[in-house]
Image: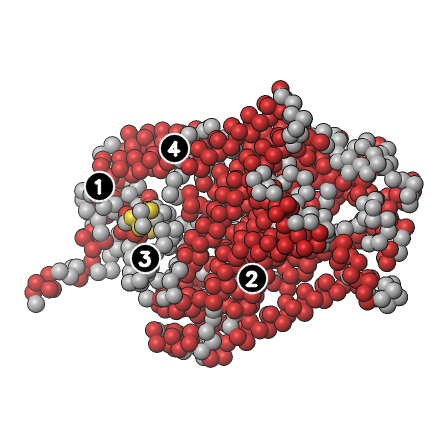
Amino acid sequence: MDSELSALPPEDVLYKRAPRARQQSLRYSAEIPPASAALAASHPMSRWNGYDAEPSSSMPTIHAPTPRRHLIDTSESQHWLGSPPLSPVSSTRAVSPFATHFPSNTSPTSATSTSIRGKKAPDSPTRRRTFSSLYNTDNPPKHLRQRQTSNASISSTYTVHGAANTVSLHKALLRSKYTQAHGETEHASLGRRWIRSMHKRGLRTWVIPSAIAFATLVKLCLGVGSYSGEATPPMYGDYEAQRHWMEITTHLPFREWYTYDLQYWGLDYPPLTAYVSWLCGLVGSWVNPTWFALDASRGIETPGSKLYMRLTVVFFDLLVYIPALIMFVKTWQGTRSKRTQEQALLLLLLQPALLLIDHGHFQYNSVMLGFTLLSINFFATGNDLVAAVFFVLSLGFKQMALYYAPAIGSYLLAKCIYLGQKNGFTLFTRLAVTTVASFAILFLPFFLPGLAPSLLHILHPIQRIFPFSRGLFEDKVANFWCASNVVIKWRKLAGDGDTGRSWLVRTSALLTALGFLPGVLGLLRAGWIMRIREDGSTEKARELDTTTASITEEGAEKAVDDSNDHPPPFLPLLSYALLTSSMSFFLFSFQVHEKTILLPLLPLTLLMSGAQPGTALHSWGALGNNVAVFSMWPLLRRDGLAVPYIATVVLWNRLVGYNPLTNLSVDFRQLFSLAVYSAAVALHALELVIAPPARYPDLFPVLNVLISTPVFVLIWLWSIKCGVEVAWALGGLSASSSSASSGVTAGQSLGTATGGTGEGRAALFRRIVT
């Protein structure tokens, strides 16, 4: 008994606590000021406070780490790839190697020092991270490794010397900070250095307006150059097609828009494109009627008409696409620093492929991409009905937005499953009514009595939108069909006529479906294993803790109803599903042309915008963007855009800080990138000095296809791999994770009912899963 009492602290010091030094995280717990360490060591409670007179170098002393908000609840995260909650560690499944938070029964120190499946967990378990940064922890860039080494050396210096030499430690700290700042300046991208200089000069509020103004200036400079079909009668090119649609929509009634003179650039885009053309033609005819005179204006290329056409593209950029980009960085990356958001916006504003096609070649792809991006943004805020309307607008502007339809449709269906039978069916009904009503309003002039001759008139735009009679692919596009056509002549194999064409359509549809199937299944499975059980979740919470037992059934039902307005925890899967789906359509679908690579580039560049230079995600994103521009080189060369091609690629790579020749290492990704870039440069050199043989006039475009297609195939496979890893981090790949995932959603719902704070939901979650 006496021995047990002797282990207790003295009575006179029970309520005398030493001043606590607040630390920012466990990672820097070894950096304790010498004065505080000496004060704590001399206090009678030092033995129970955890201080020793002589600090140990093997185990850092923790004074009092600053408590941080637990980030289990991913619905509160506004990251593009917000870190999802972990399912509990069980005997059948270990901790995910990409985990940033650890269960309550696992100490952060042991978790960070334990190798899981050959990969070390991140070194800062209290810090919120995006999935892009999770991939970066395995092999960070060289300058980041130098920073970590420098911090570790400072900590070890404080630990070893203690309070002996404060002056020398202070000098070492200053030298380390100078080295870190010098290293960051050396490795920072041109865009990041510009943003940093603007902040230092007190001009931070002008960063985004300046970036938009600079991007607009670049677009106007591109508009000074040539365009598709310039001075090439009789058909000209895409520029004349867009102008001709403004001409016919201005002078003809609705019923003739899709039937008038189909041999000369007949309208073959959905109704929203026709309405936009009608509006532009109406304004242009008010300025100068000769620009859009019916039939008489064909092939017009006056300076005034060209300036007006270029300005319409810039106007719709400012109206739709740029607000969508700003909303993206504010919504998905809202918890990141201001400079990181501005760097991401700068990267997205100056994407070279979109600049060259819309403002060089001449099209309005940014409108379709902007509507899609607005839809994705509203998914992140939980406004699914508004998001559905914007996606219908994207489909109504260009049918190529169907490339995203499997991912977005499966995401919405997965959310309906996730919400349970009652709330899920309600959401499904609302989405169905909203989608059908939106399409009906878009097509209203083509079947409404009085405007259309009959209800069958609606078939005219549908037949023009899906031109299966054109062929398997157009020109030389870097996809599976064109690349394999070098060895297998698909048209000869299928045969001529309708039978051969229908076989190619069915085969391409089957391969496309198999290509996007992993992303669809990943979303649907996530919705199933994380679904809210309206009866079992509440009972589970009552069994585990008396605090949750006081929650009524009405409160639990209200919490489930409130989850309709929040994004589900599997939202991070949507980004990779979009990339998988769109790349699958580009590689395997029927009737693809080179400009449709813009659709896979959207999710790829969005993912890249949150990554640091030198990381795997950043490298794949830069490689995909550069090779996409290279794959369109035959088209850009015909349009006379060689100089803008080089200028935009160099400018963008400098702004984002991408250089494949820095930090060389024996890594497959880097070696593959160097091989691709070397082949591209060699092909450009051959085109300058050697003319193609008369027998093979398309030799160089075919070589371009053979260089570009493997890159797109690897990016497609990489997106599937990343989707599987994110699904594992969300809820596991084993069937036993179903109950755990249900606990996650139950904890979140019950937390909402008890108070609605993130800390309350996280506390309930920890009780449920443990």
Q: Taking 453 as reference, is 665 left or right?
A: left
Determine the CA span between mark 3 and mark 4: 30 Å
Task: Inspect the image, locate mark 2, and give the three-letter code of the amino acid beneath it.
Answer: Ser
> In which quadrant of the rendered view does residue 547 lie?
bottom left
Image point (11%, 64%), residue name? 5
Q: Quadrant of the C terminus?
A: bottom left
Eye-nearest disc, 3 or 4: 4
Local secondary structure at mark 3? loop
Q: Amino acid at mark 4?
A: Val
Q: Residue furthest top?
A: 689
How are the residues colored? secondary structure
Q: Residue furthest bottom?
A: 553
Mark 1 — residue? Answer: 57
Q: Which residue is found at the position 74% from the left and 30% from the top?
A: 225
The answer to whether mark 2 and mark 3 are in CB contact below 8 A is no
Quadrant of the snapshot with the N terminus: bottom left
As measured in the structure, the alpha-carbon distance from the residue carrying label 2 to the one carrying label 3 is 28 Å
Label 4 sits on a secondary structure element that is: loop
In three-dimensional space, the C-alpha distance between marks 1 and 4, rounded to whole angstroms, equals: 34 Å
Q: Position of residue 295 (x, y in %)?
A: 91, 43
Helix, strand or loop under label 2: helix
As drawn, the label of residue 117 is: none
Q: Residue at x 42, y 37 (%)?
A: 668
- Earlier residue among tags 2 and 3: 3
Question: Are discs 1 and 3 less than 8 Å apart at CB?
Answer: no
Which numbered marker is on residue 410?
A: 2
The answer to which of 465 and 155 lies nearer the viewer is: 465
